[in-house]
Image (cartoon, helix red, strand yellow):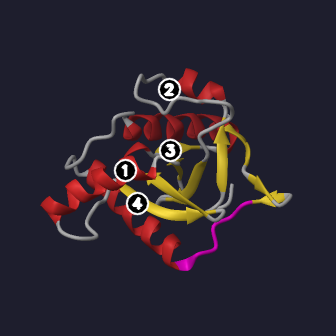
Amino acid sequence: MVVNGLYKVKDNYYKDFPNENHIQIKQGRPFYYAVKDSHGMYWLIPLSTQVDKHKKKISDIEVKRGKGNCLIYHIGVIANKDMVFKICDMIPITDGYIAGEFIKYGRHYIVMDEKLIREISQKSRNFIRQLELGRMHSQVDALKIRDKLIEKTTLVRSI
């Protein structure tokens, strides 16, 4: 996996870590944006085209927390199209659960916009930290999944 790359997730991820709040898979979507935490674990942030719906949510949060202080959603341009980064629905992952790369112009699409990368990186790190501190909640129980992935990886290494 490459940080800032876009990926699809294998169906068996959802079978191994069942949760009714996982993003619904439709015709090979959603695509996910890859980030890496301070421990080296990859996390994938689901992307959505429902920008107008999420602009309202972002606006409501910013009324309470101040302009630019929406930690759970972010709007950015991916492949010349506005997309919503659903940080609140990010999932930890390992290479074995990657179904494939998002291909654009015959190549793996990797986000190159430094400002967008910085914003998403900062928000995702902060979100993970808030989860660890118990100040925020993940609908998909991301920390539990992370712990299971770490345990699974540790077991494989010890064999």
Which class describes the residues within 10 Å of circle 4: few (<14), some (14-19), or many (20+)? many
Indicate the amino acid at tag 1.
His
Region in magenta: 109-114
Question: In the rendering, which numbered label is found on residue 17?
Answer: 2
Q: How far apart in space, not on screen, are marks 4 and 2 (Cα)?
A: 25 Å
Q: Nearer the viewer, mark 3 or mark 4?
A: 4
Q: Give the overall secondary structure of the magenta segment.
A: loop
For badge 3, the amino acid type reads Pro
Three-letter amino acid code at the position of disc 4: His
Q: Helix, strand, or loop for circle 1?
A: helix
Tell me the residue that label 1 is attached to: 54
Identify the element where label 3 is drawn. Answer: strand
The tag on residue 92 is: 3
Task: Determine if the magenta segment contains residue 111.
Answer: yes
- Marks 3 and 1 sit apart, C-alpha to C-alpha, by 23 Å
Residue 27, position in %: x, y? 68, 31
